[in-house]
Amino acid sequence: MLIGTHTYAAEGEGLRRQTAGVASLLALRDAGAVNVQFAQRPHHVEGLRTLDVLQRASTDIDPRGPRKPIVSEIFDALAAEAAVRGCEYICFTNADVIVSQQAVDWILGEDRDAFLLSREDFDGVTGAASGMQLGGIDTIAIRGAWWTRNRRRFRPYIVGETAWDNVYAAILMIHGNGVIENRRPLIRHEMHDAGRGSAFAEYTRLLSALDAFYFTRWCCYWWPLMKLREQGAAAAEEAALARSVFSRRQSAVESAVQAGRSAKARVRYAWWRVSRA
């Protein structure tokens, strides 16, 4: 398995968290780790090989925001590198996520197209766990050959922005033999203040509208999941919910409605860009 992350020039507490995440990757057995970076002005971390191949950045979309990579391009880079190395699975995780050996062993021990892991947050001072974060996916592993065959389904979302993990998860669950792990803390993340606002909110809104079917499927999974977890449901009940929600494909009527929604979203985004010029 080849695991990729994307580091940046963090400082202070951010640097400490990123260092811990990278250290967890370097300690893993049966998994190579790379730092997937921009071809221009890449960021390097000692001990972690840099794969400086990314050509696109969020600043191509709006130069007023910070430079961030494109999710689909990261997976493309990982798939190409994995093919050279002979690795079956590719994986992307945020740089401040601590990945356990148990996560790697689980992925390599199952015959799936995709593995979607939610994180457990913990307090950096006390180490106390604050529970599994069910609203999103923080680490995604995909069979490299499956990604290559299905690449067309995945839009160019921006790393670190909202919605992309939910949409990608729904696509992987609907079109692939995927599984979600949000009961065991196989990956962990130290709690910290989240950034407020985004220069790319309208772009994310556009892609989410284009992917409305998938985003809706995720919401149809997440809300009942929250209720089941509150009620102390068994793992089998939650797995049945996932099978029920993600077995549904888009109907002809829904496809027609989506075409209209997509056209409206594109016009709205184009108007917004003109108004910002």
Image (spheres, rainbow, N blue to C red):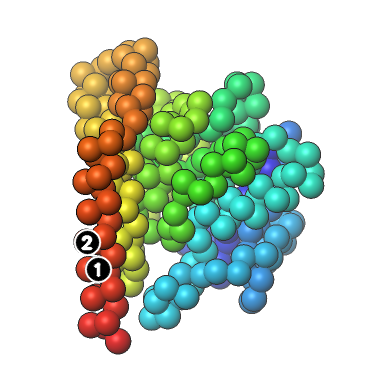
At x 41%, y 31%, the residue is 174
- Image position of 47 (left or right of 55): right
- Say which residue appears at 62% left-offset and 65% top-offset: 54
Asked if one can make out residue 185 in the rendered structure from this viewpoint, the answer is no
**Marks 2/1: CA–CA distance:** 5 Å
The residue pinned by badge 1 equals 267
Picture quarter with the C terminus = bottom left
Residue 50 drawn at (x, y percent): 71, 61
Q: Give the answer, above or below, for where 29 lies relative to 12.
A: above
Using residue 227 as the reference point, say whether residue 158 is left or right of it. right
State the residue at coordinates (50%, 55%): 71
Dot 2: element:
helix
Contact? badges 2 and 1 (CB < 8 Å): yes
Q: Residue furthest bottom?
A: 277
Mark yes or no: residue 248 visible. Answer: yes
Please say if 133 is above or below 48: above
Read off the residue under disc 2: 264
